[in-house]
Image: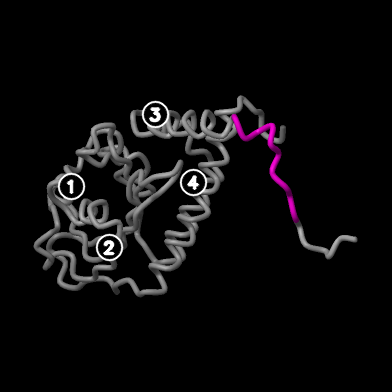
């Protein structure tokens, strides 16, 4: 008699496919950093991340993916008004910058005095004519390994006298929760691609 718990037993017929499917998912995951992310990152994924960014009080956020050589982070999605001026074209070297530190340590950061932090790389701020006053940045995993960083920022004009309110530990948890669900959605899509399945198949 069932005890009411949901239990699904593994199927031995699928065991031999696990290595092949995992390898195919990793191949597809690498392709996302190389220019396929816009097509892949669909409306439900965007809305999920944008909701998380709004809930943690960010002005905007970015999905950064590691390039094939794992020497740079590439911005593949941003929900701010200047996205078109740097998404897909800017490269953040891993030799500098706060988000690069997240890759090196695989630890999140919550920094509310970004402009005083000597590890900040101001290259993108100067390019956009803005100043980052606060930042959340978390490691972003899918398909079995670290794939990049998700960052959330609060911005101001470079000559503004006051900073916007900073982020809190609760804000960091909100962003981490959104990222964990986003990871599941991405891996679901990658699995569908690896198995050549249509949605709902």
Judged by its main secondary structure, the magenta piece is loop
Q: CA distance from mark 4 to mark 1?
A: 23 Å
Numbered mark located on residue 46 in the image? 4
Instruction: Quote the CA–CA distance across marks 2 and 4.
Output: 20 Å
Can you tell which quarter of the image residue 65 is in?
top left
Magenta segment range?
Answer: 7-16
Q: Of helix, strand and loop, which one carries label 4?
A: helix
Residue position marked by numbered label 1 in the rendering = 124
In the image, 123 versus 191, the foreground residue is: 191
Residue at 38% in and 32% down:
30
Crowding around mark 1 (Cα neighbors within 10 Å: few <14, some 14 to 19, many 20+) is some
Image location (x, y in percent) of residue 32: 40, 33
- x 35%, y 74%: residue: 168
Q: Which residue is mark 3?
A: 31
* Residue 151 falls in image quadrant: bottom left
Give x and y (percent) for residue 77: 37, 42
Name above or below for residue 68 compared with residue 145.
above
Q: Disc 3 to disc 2, how far (Cα)?
A: 28 Å
User: What's the mark number on residue 191?
Assistant: none
Describe the element under mark 2 as helix, strand or loop. strand
Position of 197 with respect to 76 (left or right) is right
Dot 2, crowdedness within 10 Å: few (<14), some or many (≥20)?
many
Disc marking residue 135: 2
Tags 3 and 1 touching, CB below 8 Å: no
Q: First in sequence, mark 2 or 4: give its number.
A: 4
Up the image or down, 150 lies above or below 114; here it is: above
**Element at badge 1?**
helix
Q: CA distance from mark 3 to mark 4?
A: 19 Å
């Amino acid at each position: 008699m069932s005890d009411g718990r949901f239990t699904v037993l593994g199927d031995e017929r699928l065991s031999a496919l696990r290595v092949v499917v995992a390898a195919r998912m990793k191949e597809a995951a690498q392709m996302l950093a190389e220019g396929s992310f816009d097509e892949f990152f669909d409306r439900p994924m965007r809305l999920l991340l944008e909701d998380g960014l709004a809930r943690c009080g960010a002005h905007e956020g970015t999905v950064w993916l590691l390039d094939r050589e794992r020497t740079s982070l590439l911005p593949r999605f941003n929900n701010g008004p200047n996205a078109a001026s740097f998404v897909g074209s800017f490269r953040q070297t891993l030799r500098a910058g706060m988000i690069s530190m997240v890759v090196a340590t695989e630890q999140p950061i919550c920094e509310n005095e970004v402009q005083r932090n000597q590890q900040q790389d101001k290259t993108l701020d100067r390019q956009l004519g803005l100043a980052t006053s606060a930042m959340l940045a978390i490691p972003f995993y899918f398909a079995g390994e670290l794939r990049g960083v998700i960052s959330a920022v609060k911005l101001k004009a470079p000559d503004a006298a006051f900073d916007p309110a900073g982020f809190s530990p609760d804000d960091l948890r909100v962003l981490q929760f959104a990222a964990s669900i986003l990871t599941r959605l991405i891996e679901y899509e990658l699995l569908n691609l690896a198995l050549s399945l249509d949605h709902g198949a």
